[in-house]
Amino acid sequence: MPHAVVAGAGYVGGVAARLLRQAGWEVTPIVRSPESLRALSDAAALALDVADARSVAASSAALKNADALIYCVSSGRGGAEAYGAAYVTGLSNLVAAAPRARVVFTSSTSVYAQTDGSWVDENSAAEPDRETGQILRTAENLALERDGCVARLAGIYGPGRSVYLKKFLENRAVIEGDGSRWINQIHRDDAASALVELATSEEARGLYNVADHHPDTQFGVYSLLARHFSRPLPPHGPIDLDRKRGWTSKKVSNRRLLGLGWTPAFPRYADALAKFGERLLIAD
């Protein structure tokens, strides 16, 4: 039975672990804290600070024969130091402890710093101006040096999590400027299935964008929500240059990932909204 390690078995990684088990894989989920381990209720799971080399070495028996390593660890919303520990140090430690594994590193489409609304694919320049984005690129290269895969995820939404829907329903939404900034999203379950595809496909190597089929402008997203809930559009306001992903505007192509045979269950945000509506904000 093939064996996968899923480091960061939380919002996306937990679903990836479940999908791998359904596909017949033995899975070792890794979470950071004993509290997360208790909440997971999984006898095969480990509580492990992946940035601590000694802790990783002590758990090497569970890692050394892994066939795949899906790395979904979060920085915990920290700055450059937290990013370095989570993405570079942690990934380096696990790659060393799992020498046989195909590595799938979850990165972000925020590494594309384009602001002109153009389409970007895996051949486009990825030159983030923020230090956190530059750290992600360093971690990406660690995975690529192992002949692994990098999954650049668009903005994640899903059960209990939808930034635009939450702001809209709480009357905190603002259309920035003319609302023409492009937004790229991916449903949690589609992100997880993409990670599993990359971990299990013999063809998968290199960079892959993980986004749905239909980017939309900020104005378009809020117009969709206004129509769905029969409510007025949010007010216009100034552009927020200090968001986590920075001020970028681009349309992310998923064509390379589609070439592996992957397809999203929710090709566009509107599909999830039509199915779940306000229930999208309820955690599962």
Image (spheres, rainbow, N blue to C red):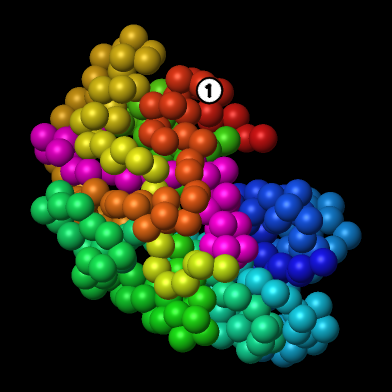
Q: Secondary structure at mark 1?
A: helix
Q: Is residue 177 left or right of residue 62?
A: left
Q: Position of residue 61 (x, y in %)?
A: 82, 83
Picture quarter with the N terminus: bottom right
Q: Is 29 part of what is drawn in magenta? A: no
Residue placed furthest toward the top: 230
Residue 189 position within the rendered picture, expressed as x and y whole percent measured from the top left: 57, 43
The image position of residue 113, as x and y in percent, is 22, 63
Considering only vertical position in the picture, is 158 above or below 119? above
Q: Left or right? Give the position of 260 relative to 92.
A: left
Q: Residue at x 29, y 52 (%)?
A: 252
Quadrant location, the C terminus: top right
Q: Which residue is under mark 1?
A: 276
Q: Is residue 275 left or right of residue 164?
A: right
Task: Determine if residue 155 is in view.
Answer: no
- Residue at 21% of width from left, 31% of height from top? 219
Relative height, residue 137 to residue 278 (above, below):
below
User: Residue 257 or 209: which is nearer the viewer?
Assistant: 257
Residue in the picture at 66% in, 87% down: 99
Above or below for 226 versus 249: above
Magenta residues, as a range?
Answer: 174-201
What percent of the width, then of the height, locates residue 199? 59, 65
Which kind of residue does numbered mark 1 sit on? Phe
Residue drawn 31% across the image and 14% down it:
227
